[in-house]
């Protein structure tokens, strides 16, 4: 999380030590990290063995890269909203503005809660997956600006993704196969 006190983890962690499909969260305490508890998302399912999640700085919005029946491509970007009881709404597809017939992965919601960074090879780029930026145009979470490639200063002919940036905007982290 933006404040460093909550960590999202893949899988559901059970007290007997086994794992099952889903996501969990752990909280930083005086004694270290808490035992992971399940993150409950209404009607959550993912037809892909892979997934990525990004929670907004205010903790109220989660964008995820998963594959569902209504996907435009293989894995699409979906949004879910935190409810007062700390569960999450059913994932809503972000639409064809940002989702292509390819897979969209590694979402990151900027501190303004309107700018979305993600990786795909579904739009014109420099080779394999490139990092793109799109801005939300309204509160429907379905209307976005045309994805803008971050250019050759960030993207290579190889795989690029996992763009993250602090609220200050002074720097960013990326993963790149170089």
Image (spheres, rainbow, N blue to C red):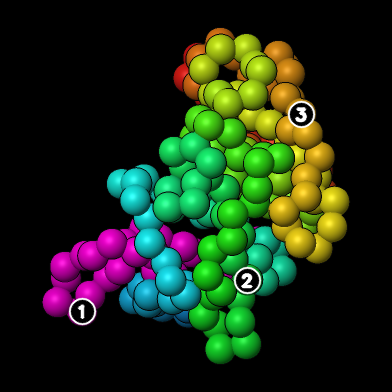
Relative image position of residue 171 (x, y in whole percent) = 75, 37
**Is 158 in the magenta?**
no
Q: Is residue 131 visible?
A: yes
Quadrant including the N terminus = bottom right
Where is residue 93? Give x, y as percent: 59, 54
The residue at which mark 1 appears reads as 15
Q: Which residue is mark 2?
A: 81
Where does label 3 land, which residue? 148
Secondary structure at numbered mark 1: loop
Is tag 1's residue or tag 2's residue first in the polypeptide sequence?
1
Badge 3: few (under 14), some or many (20 or more) residues near its Cα, within 10 Å? some
Q: As drawn, is 13 to the left or to the right of 124?
A: left
Kind of element beneath mark 3: strand
Mark found first going from the N terminus, 2 or 3: 2
CA gap, disc 2 and disc 3: 25 Å
Q: CA distance from mark 3 to mark 1?
A: 44 Å
The residue range painted magenta reads 1-26
> Mark 1 to mark 2: distance in Å?
27 Å
Q: How many marks?
A: 3
- Residue 134 vs 86, above or below: the answer is above
């Amino acid at each position: 999380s933006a404040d460093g006190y909550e960590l999202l983890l893949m899988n559901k962690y059970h007290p007997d030590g086994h794992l099952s499909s889903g996501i969990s969260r752990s909280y930083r305490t005086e004694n270290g990290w808490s035992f992971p508890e399940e993150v409950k998302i209404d009607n959550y399912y993912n037809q892909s063995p892979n997934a990525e999640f990004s929670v907004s700085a205010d903790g109220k919005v989660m964008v995820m890269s998963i594959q569902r029946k209504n996907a435009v491509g293989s894995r699409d970007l979906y949004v879910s909203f935190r409810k007062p009881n700390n569960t999450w709404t059913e994932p809503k597809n972000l639409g064809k503005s940002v989702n292509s017939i390819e897979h969209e992965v590694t979402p990151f919601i900027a501190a303004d809660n309107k700018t979305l960074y993600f990786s795909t090879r579904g739009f014109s780029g420099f080779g394999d997956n490139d990092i793109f930026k799109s801005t939300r145009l309204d509160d429907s979470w379905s209307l976005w600006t045309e994805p803008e490639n971050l250019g050759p200063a960030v993207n290579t002919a190889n795989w690029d993704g996992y763009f993250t940036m602090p609220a200050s905007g002074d720097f960013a982290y990326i993963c790149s196969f170089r």
